Image (cartoon, grey):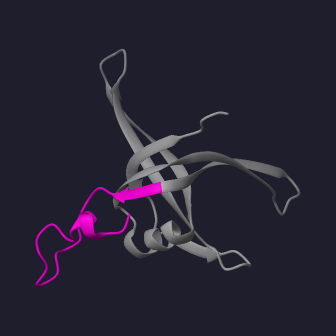
Amino acid sequence: MGLCKVTLIGNLGRDPETRYTPSGKPATSFSVACSRTYSTSEGERREETEWFRVTAWGKLGEICSQYLSKGRRVYVEGRLQTRVWTGQDGQKNTSLEVTATDVQLLDSKPRGEAVEVGEEPGGADLDQIPF
C-alpha cells in the first residue's frame, strides 16, 4: 500500500467550472496558483508561481462551485492523478492533476470585493460553510 497526498495553499486562477458525467455526478474544476519567494545566490529576491489543475467530485464539487471564485485563497488537500488523452492532432497528451478530497476557504472575501450593506465586516462565518 502507498500514499499519494498533496496539500496546496494558493489562490484560484479562474472561476470554477462544473460539468456532469453521463450518470449525473458533478465534477468541478479550477486552477490554483501557489507562489513562493526566494533569494538567489546574488541576493536578488524572486517570486515563482506554480499552477495546479484541481478537480472536486460529487458534493464537494457542488460546494466548490457555489463558494469559490477567482482570486479566493484556498487550502486544497487531495491526491495526484495522471490524465492521458489524445488531442485533435492525434498526439498523446498527459497532465498531472489534483483530485481534491478537502477544500477550505482561507479568506472571507476575494481581494478588492466590497462588503455588502448589512453584512458584517470580514464576510461569512467560515465555520458555517460546509467544507
Q: Is residue 124 left or right of residue 36?
A: left
Image quarter in which the C terminus is found: bottom left
In this view, 4 is above or below 112: above
The residue under the point 60% across, 35% down is 3
Q: Nearer the viewer, residue 10 or 128?
A: 128
Write the start and end of the magenta stretch as one range: 102-131
User: How many numbered callouts?
Assistant: 0
Query: Where residue 86 appears, x then y in whole percent?
Result: 83, 57
Query: Where residue 91 appears, x then y in whole percent?
Result: 85, 52
In this view, 11 is above or below 43: below
Q: Nearer the viewer, residue 47 or 8?
A: 8
Query: Where residue 38 appears, x then y in whole percent?
Result: 34, 28
Residue 117 image-quadrant placement? bottom left
- Whether 96 is among the magenta residues is no
Residue at the farthest right position: 90
Q: Is residue 5 left or right of residue 73?
A: right
The residue under the point 38% across, 72% down is 67
Residue 128 image-quadrant placement? bottom left
Residue at the farthest front position: 1
Residue 109 seen anywhere in this rendered image of the structure: no
- Whether 119 is among the magenta residues is yes
Q: Is residue 3 left or right of residue 48?
A: right
The residue under the point 17% across, 81% down is 116
Residue at the farthest top position: 41
Magenta stretch, overall SS: loop
In this view, 15 is above or below 38: below
Image quarter in which the N terminus is found: top right
